[in-house]
Image (tube, rainbow, N blue to C red):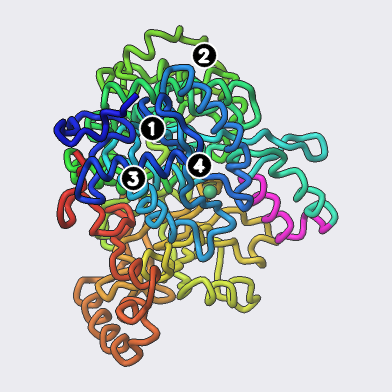
Amino acid sequence: AVNRDYDLATPIPSDAIGLRQKLPSYGDAHFSLFMRKLFIKAMGYSEDALSRPIIGIVNTYSSFNPCHANVPQLVDAIKRGVQLSGGLAIDFPTISLHESFSAPTSMFLRNLMSMDTEEMIRAQPVDSVVLIGGCDKTTPAQLMGGISANKPIIHLVTGPMMPGSFRGSRVGACTDCRSNWAKFRAGTMDIEDISALNEELAPTAGTCGVMGTASTMACLLAALGMMPIQGATAPAVSSARLRIAEATGTHAVQLAKTHLRPQIILTRESFLNAITVLQAIGGSTNAVVHLMAIANRHPGVAGTITPETVDEVGRKTPLLVDLKPSGDGYMTDFHSAGGMPALLHALKPLLHLDALTVTGRTLGEELARIPPQTHSSIVRPLTDPLHPRSALAILHRGNLSPGGAAVLKASAAREQRLLRHRGPAVVFDGAADLAARIDDPALPVTPDSVLVLRGIGPVGHPGMPEAGLIPIPRKLAAQGVTDMLRVSDGRMSGTAAGTIVLHVSPEGADPSSVLGVVRDGDVIVCDVEERVLSVELDKEEILRRMEERKLNMENKAHEEPWLACKKERGYRGLYMREVNQAEHGVDFGFLTAAGPGTTSNA
Ligand code: FES
Ligand code: MG
């Protein structure tokens, strides 16, 4: 039979699917289709297969990424779902990021992954796309890119790892990595035990098994409506995870027909739902940055979701989920307790139930299909929360973080007295200075001191590393001090705990930063209830110090990231010149909805 696809007299319709989609390449649309077909046929596809909706599957497998070790099985299961529903599944790779194998830090590469994802979705003749992500930065990168590409997408996460076992108790990456390392540093755990523990902290494939950034982002994807609500918590190595993958393939074929694009699904209400969930799970501080970056990619939402929105929602939202680092459990416990559907049922009065989801149904309709669970010790009812409100507080008042980005996980503070504290600053300039001096027995520091670390912000230490968990100086740790007020312009792992203020903006590297002119002995004031973070200096003194600093910076311009970035080459140069501050999401300005041009592919 003659293939009418090449009939020059019949224009290719604008709603063509699969390979017949109009994608600019050779100018001549018929010739482009002819070329696409002849090359893809080398993969062995038939005309029948190629006439179906094409479901792209973003394959983020890497042997450097244990959090994604199950991706090959997930790809198989998605393909089964797609093909049972009449689509053609074609997987393709993008960058894969693991937290430990993304030097200098995975956040440095998040925007690159988002660009890779956006451009590959745009470049290929896909009708909808399944984004397989899991490890911390991968899911936000994929959603940022997906929103900008604005073709139909659906997320699938790899799922959490199982907990390990050590000397009779459960352990898991990475809250227990940090708490035990702190014991080892303090000399209360010996080298044999810490080595034995190393074997057990990540015992299976999958993402960190506590409410760290990966689990947080998985829950937020469900709350945003970009993933079925059962999709967040099933363990990576469970058969449930594979069935979710199969169902995701089915949904993706549906999406190719409904054309529900992320810019249609996501509204301000979807983000408010996500923030409500973020507060109720005591989620990762990193999620605040990612949510800003995601919202600011969306032309209809950008600018309406700010760190202050996170704070406002927090004041109305109690902490309901009892997982480490804020509580005690592991992700497997949350899954057994009903996972996200159970939590969303508990949170119902606080949610916007008419927000649309990727299935084409609203969040309320999705919930109506799943009976509510009885409450458990892991998912508490609104009437019996673990923490009354504001698991994450944004310290947007005071003079130290005028950008308003400073975030503190109040629910993971170990000592309540530190939530209202004044003390003298002990200032460190960058991670190297910290490493050199923090354990110096002569360091003038007491349990009331405020440890200040600057120079680890988006530009100052490109990628804004998770170095905000400033260790307790060894001499104090040995005296039994386990928590101190700590302030920085960096991030910390979502699995970490302590009274730690992060994301101070403008960052220290910026010549207009107040953090940049704080000196040893200046009094720092933190009042979480009042949302205040200040240094007790008057305006004139701050301005005088800034002027002085600017002169010094110009004299050693090559050492100052803020000035030297103009001369950096490659991606690092692009990153340093273009990255915005924490309150905007640490994205590149030119990728945001407010940036140049249009982000829509519609
Ligand atoms: Fe990948 Fe923690 S290292 S989720
Ligand atoms: Mg992490």
Between 459 and 380, the residue placed more toward the observer is 459
Q: Which residue is mark 3?
A: 35
Marks 3 and 2 in Cβ contact (< 8 Å): no
**Above or below — where is 118 with respect to 15?**
below
Q: Mark 3 or 2 closer to N-term?
A: 3
In percent of the image, x 40 and y 31: which residue is there? 55
Label 3, residues with CA under 10 Å away: few <14, some 14-19, many ≥20: few
Going by the image, does 363 lie left or right of 500?
left
SS type, badge 2: loop
Q: Quadrant of residue 421?
A: bottom left
Q: CA distance from mark 4 to mark 1?
A: 39 Å
Between 92 and 136, the residue placed more toward the observer is 92
The amino acid type found where label 2 is placed reads His
Residue 224 location (% of width, % of height): 34, 30
Q: CA distance from mark 2 to mark 1?
A: 19 Å
Instruction: Magenta stretch: give its range.
Output: 174-191
Q: CA distance from mark 3 to mark 2?
A: 58 Å
Mark drawn on residue 375: 2
Mark drawn on residue 59: 4
In percent of the image, x 78 and y 53: which residue is there? 194
Q: Which residue is mark 1?
A: 389
